[in-house]
Image (cartoon, rainbow, N blue to C red):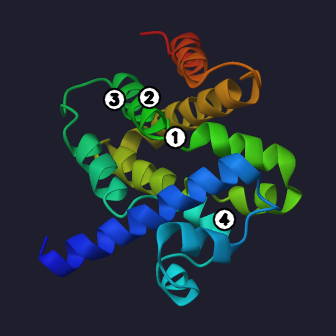
């Protein structure tokens, strides 16, 4: 990464950090793009060079995040059972959201507008995961593979939906591990 790219990434991260801090402190409706830009020491126009909206500042993946999760997928051993690989990848991805997921959940509860926008959160990750799953499995076993993938995604949703509001993020991860363990296909 050259100097210009590093500076752009640093600015992106500074704006994201400012947004997360202000939204956590003030809430979704009380926080403006102008406040986020001022906190990050950038102009309003610069904010919009990096993010389409204040929602995007919370929901968009870090520019290096996609590379990281794709690498995690590629690094799984070819002979590893699919369920074990899915468990490792999904747990790793959720763990990487430690700094945002609790705030995202709170903002969804506070703001119907944010909740509506947040419905598409994770689309790129899930698209990459599907592509990876189908690239490593035989075409003749599409039913089993699709079922395992959908069950694993249901495990994430179940862990998230049953995560109590007053429970720490580690509690969510424990729920996720429990859901994935209970959903594990029998050998």
Residue 5 vs residue 163, the one in the foreground? 5
Secondary element at tag 3: helix
Q: For residue 56, which quarter of the picture? A: bottom right
Left or right relative to 44: residue 79: left
Left or right relative to 69: residue 71: left
Q: CA distance from mark 4 to mark 3?
A: 31 Å
Secondary element at tag 2: helix
- Which mark sits nearer the N-terminus, 1 or 3? 3
The residue drawn where x is 77% and y is 59% is 114
Residue under circle 4? 55
Residue under circle 2? 91
Residue 93 vs residue 105, the one in the foreground? 105
Q: Position of residue 49 (x, y in %)?
A: 48, 85
Secondary element at tag 1: helix
Q: CA distance from mark 2 to mark 1?
A: 19 Å
Q: Are marks 2 and 3 in contact (CB under 8 Å)?
A: no
Tag nearer the camera, 2 or 3: 2
Say if 158 sits above or below 35 in the image: above
Say if 151 sits above or below 112 in the image: above
Q: CA distance from mark 2 to mark 4?
A: 24 Å
Q: Position of residue 86 (x, y in %)?
A: 40, 31
Q: Which mark is residue 85?
A: 3
Instruction: Indicate the quadrant containing the C terminus: top left, top right, bottom left or bottom right.
Output: top left
Residue projecting furthest to the bottom: 45
Q: Position of residue 47 (x, y in %)?
A: 53, 79
- Which mark sits nearer the N-terminus, 2 or 4? 4
Residue under circle 1? 146
């Amino acid at each position: 990464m050259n100097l210009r790219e590093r500076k752009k990434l640093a600015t992106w991260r500074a704006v994201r950090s400012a947004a997360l801090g202000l939204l956590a402190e003030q809430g979704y409706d009380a926080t403006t793009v102008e406040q986020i830009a001022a906190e990050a020491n950038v102009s309003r126009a610069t904010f919009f060079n990096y993010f389409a909206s204040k929602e995007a500042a919370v929901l968009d993946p870090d520019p290096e995040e996609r590379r990281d999760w794709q690498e995690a997928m590629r690094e799984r051993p070819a002979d590893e059972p699919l369920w074990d690989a899915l468990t490792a990848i999904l747990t790793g991805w959720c763990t990487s959201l430690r700094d945002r997921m609790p705030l995202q959940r709170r903002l969804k509860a506070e703001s119907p507008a944010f909740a509506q926008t947040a419905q598409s959160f994770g689309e790129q990750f899930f698209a990459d995961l599907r592509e990876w799953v189908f690239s490593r499995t035989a075409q003749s076993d599409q039913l089993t593979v699709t079922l395992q993938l959908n069950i694993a995604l249901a495990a994430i949703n179940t862990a998230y939906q049953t995560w109590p509001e007053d429970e720490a993020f580690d509690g969510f991860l424990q729920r996720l591990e429990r859901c994935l363990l209970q959903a594990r296909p029998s050998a």
